[in-house]
Amino acid sequence: MENGIPKKPRILCLHGFRTSGEILKKQIGRWPESILGKLDLDFLDAPFPALGKSDVEAFFDPPYYEWYQRNEDCTQYINFEQSIAYIEDYMVTHGPFDGLLGFSQGAFIAAASPGMQAEGVAFTKVPKIKFVILIAGAKFLGFKFGQPKLAVNAFSSPVQCPSLHIIGENDFLKEQGMVLLESFVDPVVIYHSKGHTIPRIDERGQETMLSFIQKFQMI
């Protein structure tokens, strides 16, 4: 709260696999102004150009990026540590940020970030992450069997960081997203009827999201 005016929480937004910050900005831009007007959003491109075809090529123009790579059975992650360092450096240079928002691959990272910070293995140069907003997210361990070494203990104890989870009833990651809820102490959830996408927010979802956001306008 500054001069009696609620401040806009500053949020670093992490896009999905083989998309971009600009694409995520357009997708989030479909949310109502009642929500967008209360947030200060910064959209970051992942450090690595896409190494293959993007699922959004029919809808959005390139360039496309990815945060890290993995092998087919999800037991090895490549460039994950470099990506985390890249995000932290951006937060140092362009911050401070209050929270993280992630979609899909970006949500995997955002979900693990408070735990990595608490463990002291990442995000040690930036202020404590106050909250996360996770759209179509999951735990690394919940997606088949592997996880990046840096995030191995990210969920070893209940995550105290406030979290808002947006879960699609027809998302192929719904089951893993439900498992992710169990790792957070007091998760807030918005369900929607779509699949693996960033949904429009209906009236009930708006009320839930605005209530969540309001907590951080006072900090």
Image (cartoon, helix red, strand yellow):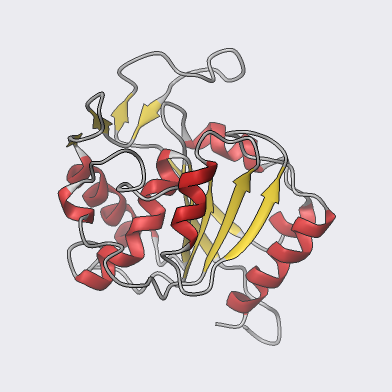
- Residue at (43, 21) in percent of width and height: 63
In this picture, residue 67 sits left or right of residue 167: left
Residue 23 shows in this picture: yes
Is any atom of residue 136 visible in this view? no
Q: Is residue 177 left or right of residue 30?
A: left
Query: In percent of the image, x 26 and y 63: which residue is there?
Result: 116
Q: Residue furthest bottom?
A: 4
Relative height, residue 75 to residue 127 (above, below): above
Q: Position of residue 41 (x, y in %)?
A: 56, 54
Relative height, residue 91 to residue 81 (above, below): below
Kindly indicate the quadrant of the structure image that contains residue 47: top left
The quarter in which the C terminus is drawn is bottom right
Left or right relative to 70: residue 193: right
Q: Residue at x 62, y 76 (%)?
A: 217
Looking at the picture, does residue 219 appear above or below residue 30? below
Q: Residue at x 35, y 37 (%)?
A: 46
Query: Between 7 and 27, which is closer to the camera in this rendering?
Result: 27
Residue 142 rendering spot, x and y as whole percentages: 36, 47
